[in-house]
Amino acid sequence: MKIIADENVFEPIIDYLRSLGHNVLSIRDAGLSGISDDEVYQRACREARVIVTMDKDFSRMFRFPPERCGGIIVTKIYGHTVQETLSIFKKAYESLQENDVTRNLVIISPEAVRIRRFINS
């Protein structure tokens, strides 16, 4: 899967996704820190990448329709250490199938994983 990791995503999460064989473009590593949410979204759309972010603004489906890019994963794990966040993320991510993510909005929190699926009409 092709992924774009927003600049707020912890490095161990990026490393974990890469260890699974995903092609992960890190906003920080690419020298793009500070670009707007719209620019992150536009790049994800152009390159058909899944956005992984801790920015809850990306859960606004009317502003950032996940069906136009590869999909969006919003990680709402706040107030935890980096290692705790990684552990929660891994457990949630392992429960997902690729078709759960593709063109959908996935919200990961410590309590649950929610999927808002794109309905092709």
Image (spheres, rainbow, N blue to C red):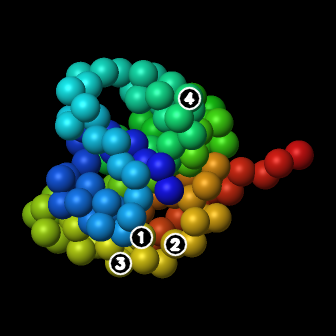
Q: Which label lies toward us, 1 or 4?
A: 4
Q: Identify the residue under disc 4.
A: 46
Q: Nearer the viewer, residue 49 or 115?
A: 49
At mark 3, the secondary structure is: helix
Q: Amino acid at mark 2?
A: Leu
User: Which residue bears the numbered disc 3?
Assistant: 91
Q: CA distance from mark 1 to mark 2?
A: 5 Å
Q: Marks 3 and 4, Cα distance to the nearest angstrom? A: 30 Å
Residue 56, percent from left and from top: 39, 43
Q: Which residue is mark 1?
A: 93
Disc 4: CA contacts within 10 A as few (<14), some (14-19) or many (>=20) = few
Q: Are marks 3 and 1 in contact (CB under 8 Å)?
A: yes
Q: Secondary structure at mark 2?
A: loop
- Marked residue nearer the N-terminal end (3 or 2): 3
Q: Secondary structure at mark 4?
A: helix
Of the two numbered discs 3 and 4 on the same chain, state the one appearing first in sequence: 4
* Distance of label 2 from label 4 (alpha carbons): 24 Å
